[in-house]
Image (cartoon, helix red, strand yellow):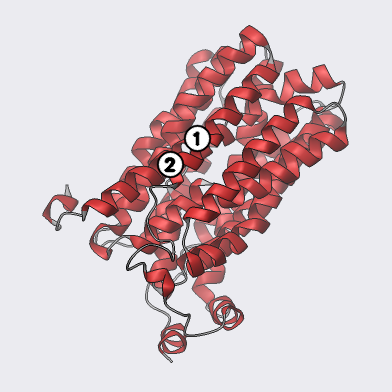
């Protein structure tokens, strides 16, 4: 592969890469399992699916709102303490969910507490840390690898959690997820880049205020287009992750098949995300790759909606969506680095990710809203298809070059 011709990474960066990949695996794997609770938790707690959908929508929004602040702290002081603090809150939120009995308690635990924790201990923070620390020769490859690790977590953790839910109930699954998130604390110790690390680049004082940095970034048209496009990614992924298992159960599909469909997404996204990172590191255009991902998503969604539900169609859908699932992340984060460099990578990608999570909020809540009123998810599936077309088109005018205005501001 292309990376074979590049100089070897220093050992300390290899350790950081492995630790960041472990964090991505655990965090995103657990995040992908929340949808397994939609039907059993709703029945056990005596609440509608709309209640649980709103909790997960709040979770996504809280994650998105926290991410820019987590990015600011990461850029200023390094990622380690952000990840540790986030993991503790994330785990506490899942533990709280296991004891929740009312809508308010579900909103507070699975929604606010877990969502804020994700802002610090998410695969997004791990990816941003890699983009900040890795040399340019290995950056796109490392971003793809870190994203692919999250998908591997989805493949591993979701079926195990489903097995535990089937055997011992959804609360047992929640305890397993909380333990997996707590393990992030150990992995975070090995992530380089805190201001206490010898030679860490985060010790340098910023050359411009963060408000000035943000104002300049949001005045850059290509950055805004990237923000708009990533909204669609969040809408689609959150809707499918949260409602797909329940959608299949409504059609008489066993829970094991539904969980394996989500796992297939994770397995094939290991390939898709890694390839996106490798291809994004070559001389070709990231924006064309990104647009192609959204066109392909739309095609996969159309094929699934128009095909009768069967085990084969479910697993093929999981595989097809998996190839396209998080392949947007290394390309999107790579474009942020193209526009603005890596000094403020975590902060600026954090705001792009906020758009993703606003989309996630609406995707999750739309699923619950339409289901409670129509008993079906059809309208949201077609909305996902329309949004794919929008995202494919909105990425095309992006200009892949450094913002000269931003470059002058940072250098001043």
In the image, taking residue 260 as reference, residue 54 lies left or right, namely right
Q: Is residue 227 in view?
A: no
Where does the image place residue 280, in percent across and percent down from the top left?
32, 56
- At 52% from the left and 68% from the top, the residue drawn is 348
Determine the residue located farthest toward the bottom in the rendered image: 412
Front residue of 177/45: it is 177
The vertical placement of 74 against 123, above or below, is below
Residue at (50% x, 70% y) in the render: 76
145 sits to left or right of 151: left
Q: Is residue 204 visible?
A: yes
- Relative image position of residue 66 (x, y in whole percent): 65, 57
Label 1 belongs to which residue? Answer: 183
Q: CA distance from mark 1 to mark 2?
A: 7 Å
Residue 187 badge = 2
Q: Quadrant of the C terminus?
A: bottom left
Please give left or right for residue 263 compared with residue 65 in the image. Answer: left
Q: Residue furthest left?
A: 5
In this picture, residue 295 sits left or right of residue 286:
right
Residue 48 in the image: state x and y as whole percent: 85, 27
Vertical position of residue 267 compared to residue 132: above or below? above
Looking at the image, which residue is at 56% across and 13% down? 163
Q: What residue appears at the point 61 percent right and 10 percent down from the top-left corner?
A: 254
Q: Quadrant of residue 231?
A: bottom right
The one of 350 and 275 positioned closer to us in this rendering: 350
Mark 1 nearby-residue class (10 Å; few <14, some 14–19, many ≥20): some
Discs 1, 2 touching: Cβ within 8 Å: yes
When the figure is inspected, residue 345 is found, relative to residue 168, above or below; the finding is below
């Amino acid at each position: 592969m292309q990376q074979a011709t590049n100089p070897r990474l220093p050992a300390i960066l290899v350790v950081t890469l492995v630790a960041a990949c472990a964090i991505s695996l655990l965090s995103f794997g657990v995040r992908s399992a929340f949808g397994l609770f939609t039907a059993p938790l709703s029945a056990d707690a005596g609440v509608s699916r709309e209640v649980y959908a709103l909790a997960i929508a709040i979770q996504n929004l809280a994650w998105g709102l926290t991410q820019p602040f987590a990015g600011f702290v990461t850029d200023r002081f390094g990622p380690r303490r952000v990840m540790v603090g986030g993991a503790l809150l994330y785990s506490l939120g899942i533990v709280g969910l296991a004891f929740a009995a009312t809508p308010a308690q579900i909103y507070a635990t699975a929604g606010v507490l877990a969502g804020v924790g994700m802002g610090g201990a998410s695969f997004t923070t791990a990816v941003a840390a890699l983009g900040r620390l890795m040399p340019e020769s290995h950056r796109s490859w490392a971003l793809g690898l870190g994203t692919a690790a999250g998908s591997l977590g989805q493949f591993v953790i979701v079926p195990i959690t489903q097995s535990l839910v089937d055997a011992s109930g959804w609360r047992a699954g929640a305890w397993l997820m909380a333990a997996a998130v707590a393990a992030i604390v150990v992995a975070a110790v090995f992530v380089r880049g805190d201001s206490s690390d010898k030679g860490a680049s985060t010790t340098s004082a910023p050359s411009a205020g963060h408000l000035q940095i943000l104002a300049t970034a949001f005045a850059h048209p290509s950055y805004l287009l990237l923000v708009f496009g990533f909204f669609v990614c969040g809408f689609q992924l959150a809707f499918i992750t949260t409602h797909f298992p329940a959608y299949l159960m409504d059609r008489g599909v066993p829970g094991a098949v539904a969980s394996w469909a989500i796992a297939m997404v994770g397995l094939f996204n290991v390939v898709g995300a890694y390839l996106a990172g490798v291809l994004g590191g070559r001389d070709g255009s990231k924006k064309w790759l990104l647009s192609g991902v959204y066109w392909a998503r739309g095609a996969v969604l159309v094929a699934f909606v128009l095909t009768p539900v069967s085990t084969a169609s479910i697993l093929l859908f999981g595989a097809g969506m998996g190839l396209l699932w998080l392949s947007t992340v290394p390309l999107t984060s790579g474009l942020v680095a193209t526009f603005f460099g890596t000094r403020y990578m975590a902060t600026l990608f954090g705001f792009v990710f906020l758009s993703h999570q606003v989309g996630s909020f609406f995707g999750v809540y739309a699923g619950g809203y339409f289901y409670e009123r129509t008993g079906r998810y059809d309208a949201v599936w077609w909305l996902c298809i329309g949004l794919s077309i929008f995202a494919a088109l909105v990425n095309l005018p992006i200009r892949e070059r450094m913002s000269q205005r931003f470059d002058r501001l940072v250098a001043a």
